[in-house]
Structure formats: structure tokens, C-alpha cells
């Protein structure tokens, strides 16, 4: 069985809130080392990989590997019933058909319990190959969020070009075109404000801004974000939650001569 | 139910292929309203659909004509969707079971619809797995086996899928308009796991001829044929948007351009291995057995 308590329920609330636009249903795979989730969006353009290590919970107990399929929208609705400072406990039996959520307020004066029905999801587990990325950019997540929302004013796609001069985000559309360049800067007093660029090889790739802007909803989970780019590989956008886990988004690059239709959803 | 189809051959190839399928040749097969035919990967109800029906002959001569062979067949481009039995709405499918009760007015207006294939959306809860309460919808493209439609060779000699249908004629202003609907029956086999209904598929020239020339509704198909005859291809969601009309509609999920799947590899599912110590009663030796 699974029993896991998160002291800061806010973390789970924010995680689910940030992925709800991307995926409809997903399996929480639970084992003794923690809880993970891997899912593709409905259009199969991006992949989300979430990991919450056992250390993120106190206590954490999971005797057997469990796969708990949930509808993310419904799960999010239930989590909205928890306050930000509530302690959240997840419980599931080995053969059960539901997951139970318990929210306890900081002063313990309020205790709520919910049972969410599980669903059966047939999804292949995808293996993620180890890639040596050509460029690695560590930057404040708020800065990436701002860049992506600014670029979305101009067009549907952004071209990320990394050279030794810096990393340039450029977009163009009917009304205007523009670019934002970020450069290496390690001088800020607060380490979180630094921008660090590791460049092995210059690279230039184009991505759908719609997805990047959805990824940036995770900026509330971490002050820092890491972008990893490599030619003919998906873009990796990673937000780490201290040492206790991460949420990684993989986004397929736009191919040359490709129309906009791929970004269409139902 | 069948509410989306693909028919991508250019008019002349389509004309030739359909003529051949009905045992005729293109010169002898008239195609009424040919200009209205537009090849499409995403044909939805209310748009134009090419059909084959018997030449409509007024009044007295009608019975005489029905004695004629298939040479009285014509191709026609018509609107997909007939009036409901109460005339209040338009429907794109007619249930096989209700033809004689609800659609007796048009039950003799037989037609067949040749397409490359049709689309179906699998949804839950399914009859096979009641636990599925809200599983994600999987879209399928269903076409005759062989090579189906290939991206590189849309004109290759693949077999067209022939569905049985009924049509109605309507007088709109001074023009006669023809509308058609696809007949569906209960499904079986693989199709049953996707959807409980399937278009009535005519897989041989005899079945086509029997349907078009017969009077009996019971003649309709033979659904045993579907599993060996049809290819069920998992595709992406590109077709969901009626405006999307390109080859991406029918491509397998993993081949859709820009798909993230191709960057990753499928993990093999781990088998759980259990080990037991068993005491052999005769020899009293302890054996360890493994079960996967």
C-alpha cells in the first residue's frame, strides 16, 4: 500500500495545476523510492516527467510498486479543496480502485478526506535516452516565463539560437518581429538571479510557444529553470524542487517546412 | 457510428477504381455531379460524399429498370446526412435494426459508398473493461488491409472500402438534391473493442450487387469478415479538427510530424518474478521454483 504525507500540500497543488492544461490522464507510479509520473500531451508534441522522491514526504511508505491512474482535471478539482498550508496525505491500497486524499490544516483544526476513483490507463512507459546536450542554460524561471510570454505576442513559434554571444529567443509574426538575448551573468548578489550558459556547440531550434508558455506555469515551483538543447533532440525544460524531485518537460522541435497544424488539439 | 471518412483519390483514379469495383468500366459509368467531388482526408457529415446508386427512373418504368443489370448504376456526388425519421434533424448513420421501422420511406433507395477508410473514436467505459471510467479517447483509422493508403503513394492500388448506405431525394427550389447516410450494425471482434457499431461493409462484388439490386434488408453484411478484412490503425488527434485536411490525419500516431514519441524508446514491461521453496513429498528435498 501507499501512504505518503507532504507537509507542504501547496507543492502538489501547484504541480497538478501546472500540468493540467497539458495532460488529461496520467498514471502516478509509486515505488519505494518515490512517486513519478510520465505522460504525453494529447497531440504527442510534449512529454512531462515528474519525480517526487520519497524524501519529499514525511512519512513515506510504499511496499509494492503501484500504478495509480487519475484524471488530472478531476484530481486538480479535489486538490483545490486543500489550503496552501495544509498537510496532504495520499493513501492507496494495493488492489483498490481509488486513491484517498486527506488534508489537514496547519493548526489541525480542520481535517478533510476525499476518495478519488482511479482509472485504467494503457500507456507505454517511455525510456528517455541520455543525451549530451550542446547547450545548457540555467536561468531564473521568472525570466524564462517573461521571455515566453513576450515572444507569444509576436508569433506562435520561438527560435532559440545559442552561440558564444548568448542565447537568443526570436519570434516573428504579421505585426512585428523581435528577439530577446540573454547573456552569461554571474554577478548578481542572489545566486537565484544568475544566468549561466554552458555551450559546447552552437545550436538553433524552433519550438511552439503555446507549449513553452504552459511549461512556464511551473515557474511557481522553482526559482530556477534549466534549458537543455541539442540538435535533433527535444528541448528539455527542468524545474527542480530543492533536492526532492523535479518536473521535466520535453518538447519536440518544429521541423523545417512544417506548418502550424501540428499544434492543434482536439 | 461512422462520422468521419477519408477519400483521397483524384477524380479520374477514383472513377476508374469504383467502376472496376462495380464490374463496369469508366466509359460506361456515368458520374453525376462529378465536379462536386473533392478528395479529402477528412470528410465530415454535411460535406460531399461520392456514392453509387441505381439510375433513378420515374414511376412506371422503375420496375422495368430494376430488372436491368448493374449497367444501370451511376456514380453521384451527394450530401452526407439524411433527414431523421421525424424530419426534425439530419443524421449521418442509419441503424440496420431500424431501417424497416423508421426509414421504410427510403429503404429501397440503396447506395454504396466507396472510401479509403473511416475514423472511429474509442471511448470508455467499455463493455470489456468496466473499470475504465474516463480513459483517453484513442482515434483509429479503419481501412481494408493490404497497404491501406500510403503517404508516398496515395494512388497505389489499394482496395477501397465499400459501405452500404441509403439515400433520399429532396426537392430544393427547382433542383433535386440527394442526401445519403451510412448504415451501421453491431460490431464484433477488434472493432467491438473500439466501438459497438460499425458501418455495414460489403467486401465482395457479389455483396455489393446483392445489396444494390436486392429488396431484402437481411442481405446486409456479414460482419464476420471485419477482423481479417480490416486494418485498425491507431492515429493521432489531427483528424479531430474538421478543418485539418492532410496526410497527418491518417498517419500512425508515432509518424505524425513533430511527435515527441520518436525521441524516446519503449521500455519493456518488467515481469515480476516470484520464487517459492517447495518440499518434494517423495524425496523430502527442498526445491526452489520460479514463476514469472
Image (tube, rainbow, N blue to C red):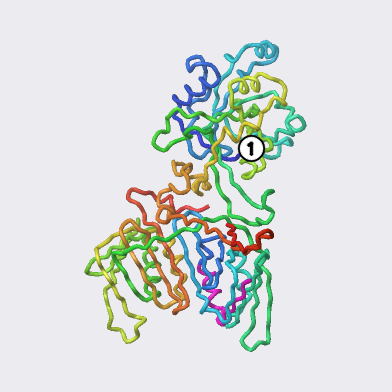
Q: Nearer the viewer, residue B149 or B73?
A: B149
Q: Quadrant of the N terminus of chain A?
A: bottom right
* Left or right of B81, for residue B40: left
Q: Residue at x 26, y 75 (%)?
A: A184
Q: What residue appears at the point 62 percent right and 75 percent down from the top-left corner? A: A3
Q: Residue reaching furthest front?
A: B283
Magenta-drawn segment: A1-18
Residue A150, percent across and down?
A: 37, 67
Image coords of residue A173 (percent x, y): 35, 57
Above or below residue A241? Residue B197 is above
Q: Position of residue A65 (x, y in %)?
A: 57, 67
Q: Residue at x 40, y 33 (%)?
A: B153
Give the side of residue A2 with respect to residue B253, left or right.
Answer: right
Q: Is residue A110 visible?
A: yes
The verdict on residue B11 being magenta is no
Relative to B268, does residue B248 appear above or below in the rendering? above
* Mark 1 neighbour density, 10 Å: few (under 14) some (14–19) many (20 or more): many
Q: How many marks?
A: 1
Q: Disc 1 on helix, strand or loop? A: strand
What residue is pinned by disc 1? B198
* Magenta residue check for A16: yes
Q: Is residue A70 visible?
A: no
Q: Quadrant of residue B111?
A: top right
Amino acid at each position: 500500500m501507499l501512504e505518503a504525507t507532504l507537509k507542504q500540500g501547496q507543492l502538489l497543488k501547484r504541480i497538478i495545476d501546472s500540468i493540467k492544461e497539458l495532460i488529461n490522464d496520467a498514471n502516478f507510479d509509486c515505488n519505494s523510492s518515490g512517486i513519478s509520473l510520465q505522460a504525453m500531451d494529447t497531440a504527442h508534441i510534449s512529454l512531462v516527467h515528474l519525480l517526487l522522491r520519497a524524501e519529499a514526504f514525511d512519512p513515506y511508505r510504499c511496499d509494492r510498486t503501484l500504478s495509480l491512474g487519475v484524471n488530472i482535471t478531476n484530481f486538480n478539482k479535489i486538490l483545490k479543496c486543500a489550503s496552501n498550508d495544509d498537510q496532504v496525505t495520499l493513501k492507496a491500497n494495493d488492489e483498490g480502485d481509488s486513491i484517498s486524499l486527506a488534508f489537514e490544516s496547519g493548526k489541525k483544526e480542520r481535517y478533510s478526506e476525499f476518495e478519488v476513483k482511479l482509472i485504467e490507463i494503457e500507456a507505454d512507459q517511455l525510456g528517455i535516452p541520455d543525451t549530451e546536450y550542446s547547450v545548457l542554460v540555467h536561468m531564473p524561471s521568472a525570466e524564462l516565463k517573461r521571455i515566453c510570454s513576450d515572444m507569444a505576442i509576436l508569433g506562435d513559434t520561438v527560435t532559440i539560437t545559442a552561440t558564444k554571444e548568448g542565447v537568443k529567443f526570436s519570434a516573428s509574426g504579421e505585426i512585428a518581429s523581435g528577439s530577446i538575448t540573454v547573456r552569461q551573468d554571474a554577478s548578481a548578489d542572489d545566486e537565484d538571479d544568475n544566468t549561466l550558459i554552458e555551450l559546447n556547440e552552437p545550436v538553433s531550434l524552433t519550438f511552439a510557444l503555446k507549449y513553452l508558455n504552459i511549461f512556464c506555469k511551473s515557474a511557481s515551483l522553482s526559482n530556477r529553470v534549466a534549458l537543455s538543447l541539442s540538435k535533433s533532440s527535444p528541448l528539455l525544460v527542468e524545474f527542480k524542487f530543492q533536492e526532492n524531485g523535479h518536473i521535466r518537460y520535453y518538447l519536440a522541435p518544429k521541423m523545417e517546412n512544417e506548418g502550424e497544424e501540428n499544434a492543434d488539439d482536439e | 457510428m461512422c462520422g468521419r471518412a477519408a477519400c483521397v483519390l483524384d477524380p479520374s483514379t477514383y472513377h476508374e477504381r469504383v467502376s472496376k469495383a462495380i464490374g463496369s468500366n469508366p466509359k460506361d459509368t456515368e458520374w453525376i455531379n462529378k465536379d462536386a467531388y473533392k478528395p479529402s482526408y477528412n470528410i465530415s457529415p454535411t460535406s460531399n460524399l461520392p456514392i453509387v446508386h441505381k439510375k433513378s427512373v420515374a414511376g412506371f418504368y422503375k420496375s422495368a429498370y430494376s430488372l436491368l443489370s448493374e449497367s444501370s448504376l451511376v456514380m453521384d456526388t451527394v450530401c452526407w446526412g439524411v433527414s431523421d425519421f421525424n424530419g426534425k434533424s439530419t443524421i449521418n448513420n442509419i441503424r440496420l435494426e431500424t431501417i424497416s421501422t423508421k426509414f421504410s420511406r427510403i429503404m429501397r433507395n440503396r447506395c454504396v459508398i466507396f472510401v479509403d477508410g473511416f475514423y472511429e473514436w474509442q471511448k470508455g467505459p467499455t463493455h470489456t473493461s468496466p473499470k475504465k471510467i474516463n480513459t483517453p479517447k484513442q482515434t483509429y483509422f479503419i481501412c481494408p488491409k493490404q497497404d491501406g493508403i500510403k503517404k508516398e503513394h496515395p494512388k497505389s492500388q489499394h482496395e477501397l472500402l465499400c459501405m452500404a448506405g441509403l439515400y433520399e431525394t429532396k426537392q430544393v427550389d427547382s433542383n433535386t438534391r440527394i442526401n445519403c447516410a451510412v448504415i451501421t450494425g453491431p460490431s464484433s471482434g477488434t472493432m467491438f473493442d473500439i466501438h459497438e457499431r460499425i458501418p455495414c461493409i460489403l467486401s465482395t462484388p457479389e455483396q455489393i450487387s446483392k445489396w444494390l439490386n436486392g429488396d431484402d434488408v437481411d442481405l446486409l453484411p456479414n460482419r464476420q469478415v471485419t477482423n481479417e478484412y480490416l486494418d485498425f490503425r491507431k492515429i493521432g488527434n489531427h483528424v479531430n479538427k474538421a478543418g485539418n485536411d492532410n496526410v497527418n490525419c491518417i498517419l500512425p500516431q508515432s509518424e505524425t510530424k513533430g511527435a515527441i514519441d520518436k525521441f524516446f524508446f519503449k521500455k519493456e514491461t518488467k515481469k515480476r518474478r516470484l520464487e517459492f521453496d517447495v518440499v518434494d513429498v517423495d524425496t523430502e528435498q527442498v526445491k526452489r521454483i520460479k514463476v514469472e
